[in-house]
Amino acid sequence: MITIEKLSDSGNKKNFIKEFIAYPKRIYSKEINWVPWFDIDMKKILRKKHPFFLHSDGEFFLAKENGETTGRICVVSNVRYQEEHNRRCAHFFFLDAEERGDVFKALLDAAAAWARERKLDYLDGPMLFGGAYGSGVLIKGYEQSAPMTMMPYNYPYYETMIENSGFAKLFDTYGTDISPDNFILSERITKMAEKVLQRGRFKVLEFKSKKEILKVVDDIIDLYNATLADHPEDYPLTDKELDQLKKDLLPIVSPDLIKILTYDGKIVGYLLAFADISPILHRNMGKITLPGLFKMMRGMKTSEKLLANGMGILPEYQRLGGNALLYYELSKTVQSRNFKIAKTVQINESTVLMLADIHKLGAVDEVIHRVYQRKL
């Protein structure tokens, strides 16, 4: 018989937190495409020390049978998301379980009951802190490695188990692959980018060190809300959440892969790309050690896979050629670094123009994540 243990009611919270973090490592230990979150970040979330919990609430559950853990889930009520999208919903995340319908149902029912107690109308997910942290259930691309912690990975049975628990599609996001051989801009886009450069108003900042990035990082982070907050998987982050996002991203930044768009000297857009070090993160299994850090730094220089995980231009500067200029600069970097593959990460199906732009660069849809909803 499945029983559900709640963190807030646990008699031994330390052991609960330890088990919540350890459980998915057991079921994915041999799956090389799965990448765990860092243990230190998980502990911050479970102890509600993440700035998200300054404005919203959440709960954590473990499914147990005969004293053994059979699954886990997190559920949150994100007040800022509800206000932005006018949707009274809770979100579930960190859903991991064995291939058992009764376990999935017990976990999702526990999350739904928590949401009903707060008089919410829907349970959506998987979603947590916005698109930068990844969302959705993987429904296509199981042979693809999860791009670090930017995109969830799960076994194929998750889709069926969730749908059998009363959930239906809310929206999909797409991950694409672009071969560097194909990542050669069309003559039209190249000429457009060159013309934009000649006019002199748009420019792309280039960086040689993280120290240079630090000088403008606050301006870059401030663009997040202005360009992404209204997307279906996002919401307006608080200043403290933006600071946390900055801390999370800086360690994995390669300066030459960050493209910042300016107009008359004002920062108006960005394209964030990263060297993929997913295999190293998998081997580290969420631990941060000195040898592991050295391997991460070396991996950022030698990785053969590029991840593009974030692009935005302020609305008033869109359709002026800035997007062509960002693609133009990124294509040069892809060629110079000899990446064997470039991947885009979680582009929402509603961003039709961006998907069209990416497909024009030769992108092929390889990964689909689905965010589900259930009426309560």
Image: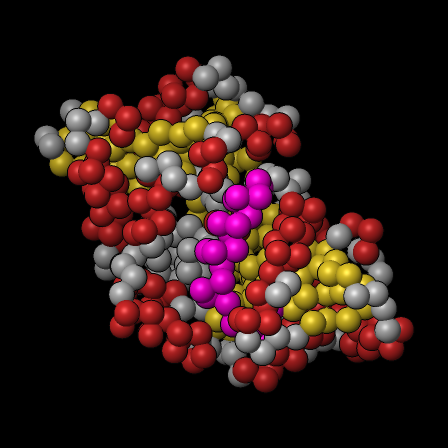
Identify the magenta region. 237-258
Q: Would you say 209 lies left or right of 352 here?
A: left
- By secondary structure, the bulk of the magenta-drawn segment is best described as helix
Q: Position of residue 95 (x, y in %)?
A: 35, 39
Task: Look at the image and say whether residue 254 sits in the magenta stretch.
Answer: yes
Residue 160 visible from this viewpoint: no
Q: Quadrant of the N terminus?
A: top left
Q: What residue is at 60 percent from the left and 60 percent from the top?
A: 217
Q: What residue is at 33 percent from the left and 74 percent from the top?
A: 294
| 148 is higher (above) or lower (below) than 182 | above
Q: Would you say 154 lies left or right of 345 here?
A: left
The residue lying toward the viewer, choosing from 65 and 217, is: 217
Q: Position of residue 140 (x, y in %)?
A: 46, 52
Residue 301 visible from this viewpoint: yes
Task: Look at the image and say whether residue 191 sits in the magenta stretch.
Answer: no
Q: Would you say 140 lies left or right of 1 here?
A: right
Q: Residue 195 falls in which quadrant of the image?
A: bottom right
